Image: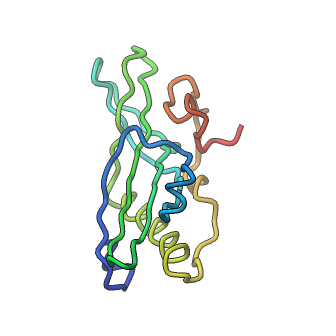
Amino acid sequence: MLEEELEYNDSWIVQFNYSLQENLSKEERRRGWKIYCHCAYGKFRCGNCSKDWPSARVTLLFHYRLRSEAARGTVIMRPFRQACRGCSGNFQLPGFSMEEVEKVLLKLIGKIKKNCYGEEEEDNSDSCSPEKVRTKPHESSLCEACSQGICCVED
């Protein structure tokens, strides 16, 4: 989807890194890395008690860069985890619907087009404000992103 939507001849790869941090070093910035943080709708299942729960506040962190001389782009993604309220077990990784994955990728592609190819960004809406109606408060004590100070919730 990345290569198809970007309409450029560069090759892009997506990798996962579960220890990715919000900040970039001076060296990483010099090498062209950029950051994008997005808040998505996901679902979790506890590995201990098998309880399921949805969350409209799943923080996704992306580092990306284009190496134009090599015609290669790299996206590194970290989905932040949440813990079960019922058993206070370990943090669990989120799952996403195909529709949500496409929505997140389109937002990321918009950032890549703007920051790597100089295109105008089509949608200027806040990435951490999903259209979903939130009926339950976000529980910061169960959120890995909150524990690292980068959750997309505005208090």
- In the rendered image, the residue lying farthest to the top is 87
The N terminus is located in which quarter?
Answer: bottom left
Residue 148 higher or lower than 109, as above or below: above
Residue 61 higher or lower than 45, as above or below: below
Quarter location, residue 11:
bottom left
Q: Position of residue 54 (x, y in %)?
A: 43, 38
Residue 50 higher or lower than 31, as above or below: above
Q: Is residue 1 left or right of residue 151?
A: left
Front position in the image: 136 or 35: 35
Q: Is residue 99 left or right of residue 117?
A: left
Front position in the image: 25 or 103: 25
Q: Residue at x 44, y 69 (%)?
A: 106
Q: Position of residue 147 (x, y in %)?
A: 55, 28
Q: Position of residue 137 (x, y in %)?
A: 61, 32
Q: Residue at x 48, y 49 (%)?
A: 61
Q: Residue at x 58, y 77 (%)?
A: 121
Front position in the image: 124 or 118: 118
- In the rendered image, the residue lying farthest to the right is 155
Q: Position of residue 38 (x, y in %)?
A: 52, 53
Front position in the image: 131 or 109: 109
Colour approach in the figure: rainbow
Number of numbered discs = 0
Residue 65 higher or lower than 53, as above or below: below
The C terminus is located in which quarter?
Answer: top right
Q: Residue at x 54, y 49 (%)?
A: 25
